Amino acid sequence: MNQIFHPKNPFTIGLELEVRLIDKNSMSPANKSPYIFEHLPPKLKPHIHKELLKSMIEIVTPVCESASEATDFIMNALFEIAEIGKEKNIVLAALATHPFERKEDNERFDDPRYDAFAKELQIVLKNFLISGLHIHIAMPDEHAAINSYNHTIHLLPLFLALSASSPFHLGEDTGLQSYRSKIFERLPRAGIPEYFESYKEYMDLTDQLFETGTIKSVKDIWWDVRIHQKFGTVELRVCDAFYNKTRLKLLTLLYRATLIYYSKKPAHREPYQISKQNKWNAVRHGLNGKFIEKNRVMTIREKLHILVNELKKADIFKEIDAENEIAPLHELIDAPAISEKMRELYSVNGSLDSVIREEIVAV
């Protein structure tokens, strides 16, 4: 595998959002993505990708200069695709987990890559009914990339808690804020990755995976954060998919600002059990979960406020012309999580349909 890191314009942004196609009447999965692909306008075709299931699509932005630009692209694409879907009674919803679907409700694409996964992963892949958000941040060089990657391992629970939106699965309340995370962790190369002392050490492992036939490309590494040397990015992959323009913009802005700040600072290795516990606390309790940092314990919400203030003190928001977003970030951190809003909606209406309808893209 090519170990050369290909730096791009530093700290530019790329977003990938996985979106579900839903039948407007039944609120069940609609295996209609082939229809969507057939009717895409030429300008959108390069940015809409197929996924494992025919009830899913993925929106991939071009390289963007700001969180606002990336978010606007995602929203405009959602609206255009939703218009296409009207003819077939299809609506769009960015659901990390569909509240009541089962594997029998979905059809898988016939594709050599997906066929190979199905043969290897068996029932794990059949139950892989989830959608996520990925955030790419371009790095100036490989040293910045490994620093940002290592720091992200420690901060994964923060971004997971801000995006957690999958409390329901198979018709019941899981008791978790992000059940999608636990489904994803069933894959053999998923979840919290290792800390690496250097970019070379990172690439030596990926080379070993490649040379032993374990992976065919970096796309087969599904860690919560990974370096994509071809794109010259660090890619955050821990987030649940969700549909909210303001939250998407602020979460993206915060991750970009965080990597600008930490890209020049080598990270210390964190005990793996601490990383696992912190992530579990986000999965189970969301923003109210405990966050362990050395011998201190605080809530994930408190750690997020500390991070924003740290970035403000270092003039990072000023550097990216986003000082007016500091107060909205603090407000977002204090606001109820998406998963909490979903549970409240279900408690009021007693209907999982209503939870889905709340996440439908309005056109």
Image (tube, rainbow, N blue to C red):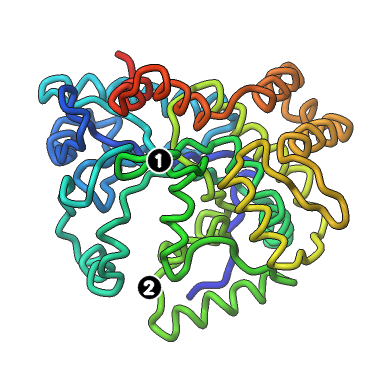
Residue 96 is marked as 1
Q: Is residue 354 left or right of residue 299?
A: left
Which residue is pictured at 58% across the width and 32% down the height?
A: 65
Left or right: residue 50 compared with residue 107 = right
Q: Are marks 2 and 1 in contact (CB under 8 Å)?
A: no
Amino acid type at mark 1: Ala
Residue 183 in percent (x, y) is at 41, 55
Name above or below for residue 75 compared with residue 281.
above
**Disc 2 element:** loop
Foreground pick, 104 / 51: 104
Depicted 205 relative to depicted 292: above or below: below
Q: Amino acid at mark 2?
A: Lys
Residue 60 seen by the camera: no
Circle on res. 126: none
Locate residue 89 relative to residue 213 in the image: left or right. left
Callout 1: 10 Å neighbours few (<14), some, many (20+)? many
**What residue is shown at x 26% (from left), y 47% (from top)?**
50
Can you tell which quarter of the image residue 350 is in? top left
Q: Quadrant of the C terminus?
A: top left
- Residue 289 appears in the picture as rendered: yes
Q: Which residue is mark 2?
A: 216
Q: Position of residue 101 (x, y in %)?
A: 25, 42
